[in-house]
Image (tube, rainbow, N blue to C red):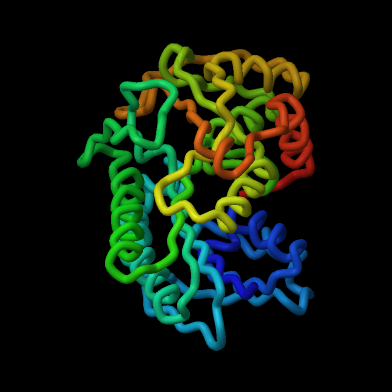
Amino acid sequence: MRILVTGGAGFLGSHLCEYLLRQEHEVICLDNLITGSVENIASLADRGNFHFIKHDVTEYVFIDGAVDYVLHFASPASPIDYMQLPIQTLKVGGLGTHKALGVAKAKKAKFLLASTSEVYGDPLVNPQVEEYWGNVNPIGPRSCYDESKRFAEALSTAYHRHHGIDTRIARIFNTYGPRMRRHDGRVIPTFINQALQGEEITIFGDGKQTRSFCYVSDLIEGIYRLMGAQIHTPVNLGNPSERTIAELAQKIIELTGSKSKTAYRPLPQDDPKKRRPDISKARVLLNWEPKVELEAGLKTTIEYFRGGRKG
């Protein structure tokens, strides 16, 4: 297939581009590099079936020739990014999704939206099932990301119902691995960076809030399986193994051999207390579930950051 990946120079996007190339597809990577990096796709540059276009997906997108699939992954995705770039985050979720869907419509291509577990907000049910409508503050500090993704899901669904676009929606839960930026604000790179520097590990709240961490290779396999499935309603993709933030901090201290101590800070507004996917739908419909254990994934990610990666 000839596949357009928006946000293809980002953390997830670059891994996805790499995976698609291994499957012998032709990949067009589109990214404005606000949070993505050419370093992430540098190893792909000499591939004859890989093409990079520096472009903002919120502006009109022109792609010459046929496109079989549009994978819309463009968006700031870490709290630091979307709190510094709230307008851009809302625009890429709204205007960017509209432009990406426009390409799919014009090219008669299939479409996959990279949505997020953040559509559930600070959930009142645990684990979260796709049928749960969420508990989201529409004007809170995280709303620019949460609501942009909720709107993107609504827009994708409207294009499916009204225009007959063959759409899919992946609700992605906390994913980690190499190519995350050291200072992007997400908990795993933050804790690893602090541990490697011998700094205090900063835990917000009492540390009892939970997350479920999925290694990037597992997530990308799930995305690829969803691409080939006829499912037009959202599908959770993540690891249902739930850990407290305090447990995560201790595990990273152990694996890095750090002498860092933990320090507690006030919990930010609207920070979710629970985050755990129910992946029954993915298990049944995609025959997919994560395989990489947290300790193995953390070891690989720690080695990546030991290599002096910046950003």
Residue drawn at x 33%, y 57% as measured from the top left = 157
Left or right of 228 in this view: 291: right
Q: Where is residue 107 in the image (x, y as percent from the top left)?
A: 47, 80
**Image quadrant where one finds the N terminus:** bottom right
Q: Compared with residue 182, is residue 1 higher up or lower down, i.e. above or below?
A: below
Quadrant assignment, res 16: bottom right
Quadrant assignment, res 127: top left
Residue drawn at x 28%, y 42% as measured from the top left = 143
Q: Position of residue 218 (x, y in %)?
A: 67, 41
Quadrant assignment, res 228: bottom right
- State whether residue 279 appears in this view: yes
Residue drawn at x 66%, y 34% as measured from the top left = 290
Q: Position of residue 304 (x, y in %)?
A: 75, 41
Give whichever of 42, 277 is nearer the camera: 277
Q: Compared with residue 141, is residue 156 higher up or lower down, i.e. above or below?
A: below
Left or right of 148 in this view: 39: right
Q: Compared with residue 280, is residue 225 higher up or lower down, i.e. above or below?
A: below
Give whichever of 200, 30 is nearer the camera: 30
Q: Where is residue 80 in the image (x, y as percent from the top left)?
A: 44, 42
Q: Compared with residue 158, is residue 264 higher up or lower down, i.e. above or below?
A: above
- State whether residue 76 appears in this view: no
Give whichever of 61, 157 is nearer the camera: 157
Total numbered badges shown on the rendered structure: 0
Residue drawn at x 75%, y 24% as measured from the top left = 256
Left or right of 244 in this view: 269: left
